[in-house]
Structure formats: structure tokens, C-alpha cells
Image: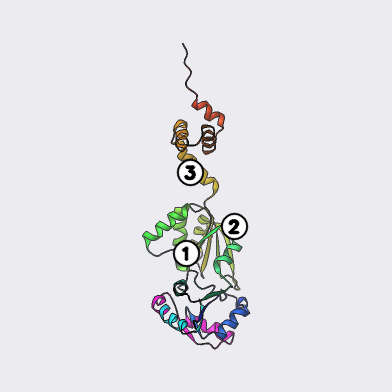
């Protein structure tokens, strides 16, 4: 009989956020796979959980995943926990989940705290559409490519950052994205929780005078519709109105509709488009 993998969300700070369902699951599991057993033992002791524990982290995620799969094939129930929050989000748990899916081993999630969602809801920035980037890569070339992609991102952007990298990351974000709004969140759900809505420029100035402390979630404003429209219009302005019309008519669009689209693209009236398309008047 095949076992099952349980993704157990743990508190990101306040132990009161531990759900009764997760406590029960951790007690009943055959084995707990933890990102850092030294951190997790304090959590387990607090809730009087005596289940055996093994380490599963970034540096052993591939080989240890195969060991855990062996236990699951043998019918064991394994609970996966991370240092804080929901496993498999910016976490090696995604490797184990993927391997379970490949082998048809059941996986279920016991939801709870997630720092990215908690920060988003507190940020004051648009929350209907967002993207989660996690930690930016250490490799400079890869980081530059990702930042260039984020420059075009219209959704609210969520990033994680460690205190010793924060100042550099803020400067890199401002250099590529410009002076956007940002909310910096730290110590979420803890006694000294801090929510700091500001701009990238002001954040850079602030942390030149104040040393960053604690792990940060950065919630950054996406590129505005106004900026996107201005960039698009700048592109259309490189074409004459006649060339702009030809662009649409070559796609089989009727002349009247093409005129409407050209007017919309350029932010002018259809009458202006029509006037530009009239043949020049000759005088004897």
C-alpha cells in the first residue's frame, strides 16, 4: 500500500497560527521531513509532538527525495515542513512534490501561513493580480535577465530578501524598474512586525541610515497602464499614419476599423486620421 505526503504549513512567527489539523497530522505521521531539524525541534516540543524527524533541505533535496520516496512506496505517511510557512514555496519541497506526482504517490496540503500572501494583504498595493518571484538569483547575469522581465510586469511583484542583501537589491530594483511604490514587510506576525509603505528611492535612503534587520518580503508596484500606453504610443509614432493604416489593412482589417484602431493607438480622433489620409489638394 502506497503512503502519502502531507505538506504542513507552520507559523511564520506567531505560534498561535499553527492549525489544530497540522498538529494532529504531525503527531500521526510516521516521519517528519524538516528543512532544519534544529529549528523545527523547538516547534515540535512546543506542541508536544514526538514523531521522528529527518532533514530535507536545499543541499540534499534530490538524493533525500529518493530516500523519502522509498518510505512512501513502503506505505509510510510523511509530513513535510519548512522553517516557516508553507512547504514548496521558494522551498526544496517542490522537488519532492514533483517526484511524488511522477510516481502517482498521493500528496495533500494542510494550508496555513505563507509570508508572501500575508505581506501582499498588508501592503496596500493592488492584490487582484500579482506574481511571486521569491529570492532573486545570486548569479548576476541571471538576476539581470529576471529584473528586465519584471520591468515589463504589470502585476504587483512579491520578492523575498535577506537583511544583508536588502540594500543592494533595492538599488538594483530602482535602477531597472524606476522609482516605484514598494512596501517592505518584516517580522510578520511577530511582536515587532513592521509594514513600511514607501518608494524605492526613499527606501534606499532610509536603509543607508538604518541597518536592515530580519527577513524581508518586498511588495513592489507593477508597471502602470499609463506607462505601458505611453511606450506603445511612442512605438506607433515612429510610423506615419499611412504606414500605421497599412499595418492593419495588411492583416485583412477593413478600412473603417483600421482607422478606429489607428486613432486609439495614437490617442487622436478618427477625424484626424481621416484628414491625414486625404490626398493633397492641388491649386492652379
Residues packed near mark 1 inside 10 Å, few (<14), some (14 to 19) or many (20 plus): many
- Kindly check if marks 1 and 3 are in contact, taking CB atoms under 8 A apart as contact: no
Q: For mark 2, what is the residue?
A: 128
Q: Are marks 1 and 2 in contact (CB under 8 Å)?
A: no
Q: Is residue 206 magenta?
A: no
In primary-sequence order, the first of circles 1 and 3 is: 1
Which is more toward the observer, 247 or 189? 247
Mark 2 vs 3: CB contact within 8 A: no
Q: Residues within 10 Å of mark 3 (few under 14, many from 20)?
A: few
Q: Residue 278, can we see it? A: yes
Circle 1 — which element? Answer: helix
Q: Which mark is residue 231?
A: 3
What is the CA distance from the residue labelled 1 to the residue labelled 3? 30 Å
Q: Earlier in the sequence, mark 2 or mark 3?
A: 2
Q: Locate residue 196, reporting x and y percent.
A: 57, 62
Above/below status of 82 relative to 220: below
Residue 276 position within the rendered picture, expressed as x and y whole percent measured from the top left: 50, 27
Magenta residues?
36-64
Membership of 45 in magenta stretch: yes
Task: Name the secondary structure under disc 2.
Answer: loop
Choose top left, top right, bottom left or bottom right for residue 257.
top right
Residue at screen point 41% across, 79% down: 66
Q: Which mark is residue 82?
A: none
Where's residue 264, x and y in %? 54, 38
Disc nearest the viewer among 2 and 3: 2
Determine the secondary structure under disc 3: helix
Q: How many marks?
A: 3
Q: Nearer the viewer, residue 136 or 97?
A: 97
Circle 2 Cα neighbour tier, 10 Å, few/some/many (<14 / 14–19 / ≥20): few
Q: Which residue is mark 1?
A: 166
Amino acid at each position: 500500500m502506497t503512503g502519502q505526503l502531507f505538506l504542513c504549513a507552520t507559523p511564520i512567527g506567531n505560534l498561535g497560527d499553527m492549525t489544530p489539523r497540522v498538529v494532529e497530522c504531525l503527531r500521526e505521521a510516521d516521519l517528519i521531513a524538516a528543512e532544519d531539524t534544529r529549528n523545527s525541534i523547538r516547534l515540535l516540543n512546543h506542541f508536544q509532538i514526538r514523531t521522528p524527524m529527518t532533514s530535507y533541505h536545499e543541499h540534499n533535496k534530490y538524493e533525500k527525495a529518493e530516500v523519502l520516496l522509498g518510505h512512501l512506496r513502503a506505505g509510510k505517511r510523511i509530513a513535510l515542513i519548512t522553517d516557516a510557512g508553507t512547504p514548496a514555496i521558494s522551498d526544496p519541497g517542490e522537488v519532492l512534490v514533483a517526484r511524488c506526482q511522477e510516481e502517482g504517490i498521493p500528496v495533500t496540503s494542510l494550508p496555513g501561513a505563507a509570508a508572501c500572501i500575508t505581506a501582499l494583504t498588508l501592503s496596500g498595493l493592488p492584490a487582484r493580480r500579482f506574481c511571486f518571484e521569491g529570492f532573486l538569483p545570486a548569479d548576476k547575469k541571471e538576476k539581470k535577465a529576471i529584473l528586465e522581465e519584471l520591468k515589463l510586469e504589470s502585476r504587483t511583484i512579491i520578492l523575498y530578501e535577506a537583511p544583508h542583501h536588502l540594500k543592494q537589491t533595492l538599488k538594483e530594483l530602482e535602477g531597472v524598474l524606476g522609482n516605484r511604490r514598494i512596501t517592505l514587510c518584516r517580522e510578520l506576525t511577530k511582536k515587532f512586525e513592521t509594514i513600511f509603505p514607501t518608494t524605492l528611492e526613499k527606501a534606499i535612503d532610509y536603509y543607508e541610515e538604518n541597518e536592515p534587520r530580519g527577513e524581508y518580503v518586498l511588495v513592489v508596484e507593477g508597471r502602470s497602464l499609463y506607462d505601458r500606453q505611453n511606450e506603445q504610443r511612442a512605438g506607433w509614432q515612429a510610423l506615419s499614419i499611412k504606414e500605421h493604416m497599412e499595418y492593419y489593412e495588411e492583416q485583412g482589417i477593413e478600412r473603417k476599423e483600421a482607422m478606429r484602431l489607428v486613432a486609439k493607438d495614437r490617442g487622436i480622433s478618427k477625424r484626424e486620421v481621416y484628414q491625414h489620409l486625404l490626398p493633397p489638394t492641388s491649386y492652379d
